[in-house]
Amino acid sequence: MRATDGYRRRIELATVSAEVVRGEMEDDFHHFRVSIVHEDGKVVVVDGEAVRHPWSTCPDALEPLRALVGAPVTTDATAHGAHGDARTSCTHWFDLAGLAIAQAGAGREHRRYDMSVPDRGPDGRTTAHLFRDGTPVLDWEVDAQTVLGPTPYTERAMGRGFLTWANATLDPDTAEAAIALRRACRISLGRLMDLDDYERASEVGHGMADTCHTFSTAVMETALRVKGATRR
């Protein structure tokens, strides 16, 4: 990914056989792959690859991600949250696995999301964009924590409750896109710091404690920064 004046994220989902879906996500900070095998409406195998990651312990999150074995195959990319916990795995791998499961549930051959969040201006605002399969779908005005517009997203906080609201309010395809863009908007704030200034995850701040595998209290002290992993 080339240097830009904003954050970029791409997600690609592909059905490679009747039983196998693969997903890939790349952004400024991460590059993960996942493979889901399903039979009789349930996930039977979860595998993946951490191609590029910010901390030395990120690849270890694959093992807790395998808790999704047995999860039902549905068209809801968040339903797997009832079968596993993103906080014990990797947030990005967990999201990607949910999208791959939904891809299997929908029976689609391919889907691609391209998202961009230009760096925020002096007023703390920017306009985030999402394209699905090359077609523009969402344009949001956002600040650090809130979608400011347009309707029906106006003044919608991007924290807790967003997924429930999106699934209850929007059609399934739009909800999936909105949830994907919400994640991109939140992760884009990582551009405000240089992670190479830190040696261990614990130095970033204990406010991140227990938000994912690497930032679990048992791991963050031993999670070393992978210098040069960020692409700008």
Image: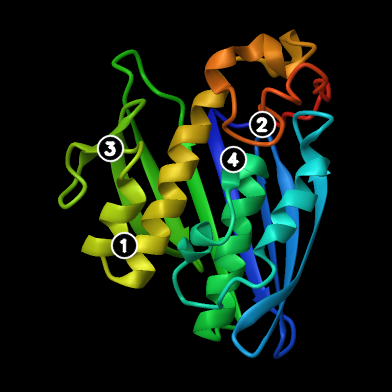
- Between marks 3 and 1, how big is the CA–CA gap? 21 Å
Q: Residues within 10 Å of mark 2 (few under 14, many from 20)?
A: few
Residue under label 1, please give it: 167
Residue under label 3, please give it: 141
Q: Amino acid at mark 4?
A: Arg
Determine whether label 3 and label 1 are within 8 Å by CB.
no
The location of residue 117, given as percent across then percent down, is 45, 37
Indicate which label's residue lies in the foreground, 2 or 1. Answer: 1
Q: Residues within 10 Å of mark 3 (few under 14, many from 20)?
A: some
The location of residue 54, given as percent across then percent down, is 75, 30
- Between 84 and 153, the residue placed more toward the observer is 84
Residue under label 4, please give it: 87
The first of marks 1 and 4 along the sequence is 4
Q: Amino acid at mark 1?
A: Asn
The first of marks 3 and 1 along the sequence is 3
Is disc 1 placed on a helix, strand or loop?
helix
Q: Is residue 52 visible?
A: no
**Is residue 79 shown above or below 221?**
below
Residue under label 2, please give it: 3
- Between marks 1 and 4, how big is the CA–CA gap? 21 Å
Q: Residues within 10 Å of mark 1 (few under 14, many from 20)?
A: some
Is disc 2 placed on a helix, strand or loop?
loop
Q: Amino acid at mark 3?
A: Glu
